[in-house]
């Protein structure tokens, strides 16, 4: 499938939950333009939303006035098109090893976001960012064959 | 506890027999999940025998919304109330499935089924 979008979208948002719907809408639209099914777009959107929520809650400890840079980009890797979402914050470094997913048999609130991201995204990479904070890169590839919506 | 606000996510409440039906409106995410939880817990203060949480008008929910519902379910069980979710769209249902909470909650396809 020919990717109709070549350039990334970049947004500078604040660490307020009020900005989450804006990013969700952008992620969903980019997924749509890249040819993702509605079901897969929903999974990518949810994963990016969980990642942003974790930044707000953990890296910035609930502060609503801190910066987050968001990049939503088409990727073409190994013959497959996909979407890459990069989130950069300047809060406390929160690496993958610190983002614990809980045992799903333990029914209690919390700890589900990381599990969702790991299940739904093909790549999830946390790196310390230059100058402090965390750079999170998430990638979701389009299915190799024409997708059948579950 | 503060009663539901007129424009809160769970402000549309009606009673039918021994059941309370809460029609939730809009996205339930980090922005609104705390308010949503408080509103539903306020309804539980009335100690209904059955609580139906109608998610028909919820296009999107994240894990904070699910966490709120887990807290509400825990409280409902302690009170001996039956809690049923209904009207989940495919995306919201998928969230319950990926977190394996579809086996923990009672999920009905429609409100009529939830009340049956």
Image: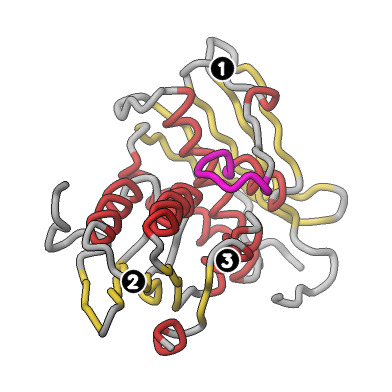
Residue stretch rendered in magenta on the structure: A104-113
Farthest top residue in view: A131
Q: Nearer the viewer, mark 3 or mark 2?
A: 2
Counting the numbered discs, the total is 3
Determine which residue is flagged by label 3: A32
Determine which residue is flagged by label 2: B49
Q: In this view, does A132 lie above or below A74?
A: above
In the picture, measured across the screen, residue A117 lies left or right of residue B66, that is right
Q: Which is more toward the observer, B75 or A17?
A: B75
Q: Which is more toward the observer, A149 or A82?
A: A149
Q: Identify the secondary structure beneath mark 3.
A: helix
Q: Nearer the viewer, mark 1 or mark 2?
A: 2
Farthest right residue in view: A78
Q: Is residue B84 above or below residue A82?
A: below
Give the residue drawn at x 63%, y 17%: A128
**Residue A105 is inside the magenta segment:** yes
Crowd rating for badge 1 (residues with CA inside 10 Å; few <14, some 14–19, many 20+): many
Q: Nearer the viewer, mark 1 or mark 3?
A: 1
Q: Is residue B13 above or below residue A26?
A: below
User: Which chain letter matches label 3?
Assistant: A
In the picture, measured across the screen, residue B47 lies left or right of residue A20, that is left
Q: Is residue B107 above or below residue A98?
A: below
Q: Position of residue B34 (x, y in %)?
A: 32, 46
In the picture, measured across the screen, residue A7 lies left or right of residue B61, that is right
Q: Earlier in the sequence, mark 1 or mark 3?
A: 3
Q: Position of residue B68 (x, y in %)?
A: 41, 50
| Mark 1 vs 2: CB contact within 8 A | no
- The quadrant of the image that shows the N terminus of chain A is bottom right
Determine which residue is flagged by label 1: A93
Crowd rating for badge 2 (residues with CA inside 10 Å; few <14, some 14–19, many 20+): some
Give the residue drawn at x 48%, y 30%: A55
Q: Quadrant of residue A63?
A: top left
């Amino acid at each position: 499938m020919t990717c109709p979008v070549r350039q990334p979208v970049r947004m500078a948002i604040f660490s307020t939950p009020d900005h989450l719907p804006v990013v969700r809408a952008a992620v969903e639209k980019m997924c749509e333009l890249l040819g993702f099914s509605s079901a897969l777009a929903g999974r990518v959107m949810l994963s990016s939303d969980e990642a942003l929520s974790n930044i707000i809650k953990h890296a910035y400890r609930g502060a609503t006035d801190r910066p987050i840079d968001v990049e939503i980009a088409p990727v073409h890797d190994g013959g497959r098109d996909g979407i890459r979402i990069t989130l950069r914050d300047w809060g406390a470094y929160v690496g993958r090893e610190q983002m614990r997913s809980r045992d799903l048999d333990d029914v209690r609130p919390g700890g589900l976001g990381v599990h969702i991201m790991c299940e739904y995204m093909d790549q999830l990479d946390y790196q310390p960012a230059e100058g402090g904070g965390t750079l999170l890169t998430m990638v979701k590839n389009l299915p190799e064959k024409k997708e059948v919506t579950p | 506890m503060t009663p539901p606000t007129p424009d809160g996510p769970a402000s549309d409440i009606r009673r039918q027999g021994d059941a309370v039906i809460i029609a939730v409106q809009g996205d339930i995410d980090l922005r609104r999940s705390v308010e949503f939880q408080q509103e539903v817990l306020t309804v539980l203060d009335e100690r209904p025998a059955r609580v139906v949480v109608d998610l028909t008008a919820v296009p999107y929910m994240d894990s904070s919304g699910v966490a709120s519902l887990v807290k509400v379910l825990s409280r409902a069980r302690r009170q001996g109330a039956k809690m049923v979710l209904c009207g989940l769209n495919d995306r919201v249902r998928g969230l319950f499935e990926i977190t394996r909470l579809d086996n923990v909650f009672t999920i009905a396809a429609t409100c009529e089924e939830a009340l049956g």
